[in-house]
Structure formats: C-alpha cells, structure tokens
C-alpha cells in the first residue's frame, strides 16, 4: 500500500512539473506572439530629381501574408507631421522581402528634412522610419507609433488588394 501511495504521488508530482513547464512555455510563446510588432519597416530611402519634383525609392520589409496582411503604402511627411506624398502599394509582397518601390513627384526642397514611414493594412504605422533630406541623405530612426496618426485617413487610400 505504501508503494502504491508513493507511485501515485510520484506520477502526480512529475505530471505537475511537466504540465507547469509546458504551460509556462505556451504562455511564453503566447506573450511573444502578442508582443510581436506587425509593421512595414522602412529599410532604405534614396531620392533623385530636381527641387519640387523628387522621386523617392523606398525599401520596405513587412510580414506580408497575402491580401489579409500586407504593406499597403509608404509616405513622406514633414517634420511636423504634414502628409507630403503617399505611394499606394496595390498588392502584397509575400515572396519579395524586402522590396523597393519608387514614387513621386515629392514637392520638397533639397534641404527640407522629411520622414518616410510605412503602413500595414492590418496594423497601421510602425515605428522604424527613415529621416533626412535629399542633399544630406536619409538615416534610420524611430518614431512614436502614434506620430501624425490623423494622416492615416487622408487621401489617397488603397483600393482592393490585387494579390
């Protein structure tokens, strides 16, 4: 009888350890997924052209899965958050990461400092941006997730995703 109690106790004790470990592991995975940021990160910016009519080439890295989740635009903002230009992306880039898309003309001066950021159709704006000027170049930076959030509703807006 003593052996039976010991055996039952061992099974319960060992089972609770495994259950506790797997529950903690599952909780850690859930927390990691919850804390993972879905964002269209800007990874490069170049500009060429003339004053008042620059073409920007913008590199974006985004966790596209298809039309259900994709980077739907990148935009150029003034330092105070005014929308200067928005390039609509008409399809997902699941198998093309990172990708570069050009757009313009962007009506700025060569020394005007601007912010370039990306947007996800499901999650909105991320925080990884590029900031700089045509003459001085663009550098990677961070910005508050809610910086100039009100421009999100401004035109142009994307239509239906092609694929």
Image: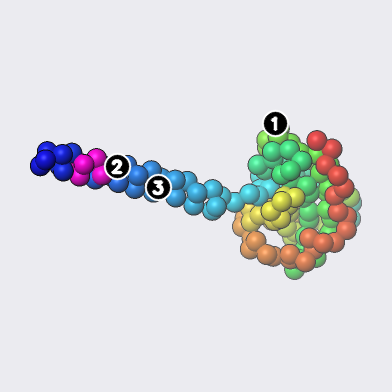
Residue 95, by quadrant, is top right
Name the residue furthest top.
95
Q: Secondary structure at mark 2?
A: helix
The span from disc 3 to disc 1 (Cα, nearest Å) is 34 Å
Q: Which comes sooner in the sequence, label 1 or label 2?
A: 2
The span from disc 3 to disc 2 (Cα, nearest Å) is 12 Å
Badge 3 density bin: few <14, some 14–19, many ≥20, Cα 10 Å: few
Which of label 3 and label 2 is nearer to you? 2
Name the mark on residue 86. Answer: none
Locate residue 122, reporting x and y percent: 71, 51
Name the mark on residue 23. Answer: 3
Q: Which residue is mark 1?
A: 95
Which of label 3 and label 1 is nearer to you? 3
Q: Which residue is mark 2?
A: 15
Q: Is residue 83 magenta?
A: no
Residue 87 visible at all: yes
Q: Secondary structure at mark 1?
A: loop
The quarter in which the C terminus is drawn is: top right
Give the residue at x 83% y 53%: 86
Q: Which comes sooner in the sequence, label 3 or label 2?
A: 2
The quarter in which the N terminus is drawn is: top left
Residue segment shown in magenta: 8-12
């Amino acid at each position: 009888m003593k052996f039976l109690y010991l055996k039952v106790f061992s099974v319960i004790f060992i089972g609770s350890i495994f259950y506790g470990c797997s529950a903690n592991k599952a909780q850690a995975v859930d927390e990691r997924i919850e804390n993972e940021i879905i964002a269209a990160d800007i990874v490069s910016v170049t500009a060429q052209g003339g004053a008042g009519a620059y073409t920007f080439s913008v590199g974006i890295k985004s966790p596209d899965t298809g039309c259900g989740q994709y980077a739907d635009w990148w935009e150029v903002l003034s330092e105070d958050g005014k929308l200067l230009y928005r390039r609509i992306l008409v399809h997902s880039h699941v198998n093309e990461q990172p990708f570069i898309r050009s757009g313009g003309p962007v009506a700025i001066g060569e020394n005007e400092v601007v912010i370039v950021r990306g947007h996800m159709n499901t999650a909105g704006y991320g925080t990884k941006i590029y900031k700089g000027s045509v003459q001085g170049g663009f550098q990677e930076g961070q910005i508050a997730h809610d910086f100039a959030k009100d421009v999100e509703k401004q035109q142009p807006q994307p239509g239906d995703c092609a694929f």
